[in-house]
Structure formats: structure tokens, C-alpha cells
């Protein structure tokens, strides 16, 4: 059972913007860390979107659900929370 997830994210204000960023990532021409620094509205964007390790109960419920259920290495989303629309990349799990 997964107890903690290490994830990075890109927070966008609108679903449209999140989809635009996801499409750029899907082409493989852009890298997640660079896109986080360029587009994320979250302060973690300065750190390539890296949120570090977190357990359950630490993130918005929709975000947490996606991160804990998502496949390692895949980009998930857009996932809507009260903060906006997230693209989430699960980096590791333990």
C-alpha cells in the first residue's frame, strides 16, 4: 500500500491553459520541469513544480486522489481543485 507520494505539478488558472500545457508536454518537445517554471502559478514552480513527499491528508482531496492513484512517470490531469487546474507528475511512491 502506498503511504507517500513524491510529485510535481503545474498549476494553471484555467482548464484551457492546463490543456494547452498538457498538449505541449505530450509532444515530448517540452520537459515538465521547464514547463512548471514557465507556467505554474504555484510557488513550487520555481522548484520545477516539485512538491516533495507527502502523505494522505496533506493536499486538496482531488489532487491527492489523482496523485495516489496515478501511475509513476505519467502526467495526470488537468485535475481541478479550489486552487485551479493541476497537471501532476508522480515522481515516486513508497
Image: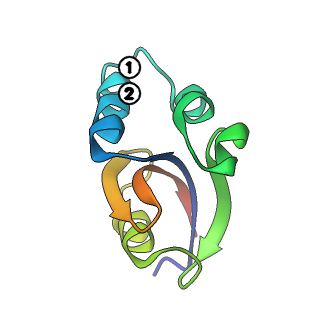
Extreme bottom residue here?
57
- Residue ID at (29%, 46%): 15
Extreme right residue here?
47
- Color theme of the render: rainbow
Around disc 2, counting alpha carbons within 10 Å, would you say few (fewer than 14), some (14 to 19), or many (20 or more)? Answer: some
- Residue ID at (37%, 45%): 74
Is 63 left, or right, of 77 in this rendering? right
- Secondary structure under badge 2? helix
**Where is mark 2, residue-wise?**
25
Quarter of the N terminus within the rendering:
bottom left
- Residue ID at (61%, 50%): 42
Which image quadrant for residue 93?
bottom right
Q: As rendered, which of 19 and 16 lies closer to the eye?
A: 16
From the top left corner, tell me how far across and down residue 73 is, in percent: 44, 45
From the top left corner, tell me how far across and down residue 52 is, in percent: 68, 59
The number of numbered badges drawn on the structure is 2
Q: Are the residues at dot 2 and dot 1 in contact (C-beta closer than 8 Å)?
A: yes
Quarter of the C terminus within the rendering:
bottom right
Is 50 left, or right, of 8 in this rendering? right
Which mark lies nearer to you, 2 or 1? Answer: 2
**Where is mark 1, residue-wise?**
28
Extreme front residue here?
13
Which circle marks residue 83 in the picture?
none
Tell me the distance, in whole angstroms, between the alpha carbons under discs 2 and 1. 5 Å
From the top left corner, tell me how far across and down residue 64 is, in percent: 45, 72
Q: As rendered, which of 22 and 94 lies closer to the eye?
A: 22
Q: As rendered, which of 48 and 93 lies closer to the eye?
A: 48
Which image quadrant for residue 59?
bottom right
From the top left corner, tell me how far across and down residue 17 is, in percent: 34, 36
Amino acid at each position: 500500500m502506498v503511504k507517500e507520494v513524491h510529485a510535481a505539478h503545474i498549476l494553471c488558472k484555467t482548464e484551457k491553459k492546463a490543456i494547452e500545457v498538457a498538449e505541449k508536454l505530450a509532444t515530448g518537445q517540452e520537459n515538465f520541469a521547464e514547463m512548471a517554471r514557465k507556467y505554474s502559478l504555484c510557488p513550487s514552480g520555481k522548484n520545477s513544480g516539485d512538491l516533495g513527499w507527502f502523505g494522505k491528508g496533506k493536499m486538496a482531496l482531488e489532487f491527492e486522489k489523482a496523485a495516489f492513484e496515478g501511475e509513476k512517470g505519467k502526467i495526470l490531469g488537468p485535475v481541478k481543485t479550489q486552487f485551479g487546474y493541476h497537471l501532476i507528475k508522480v515522481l515516486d511512491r513508497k
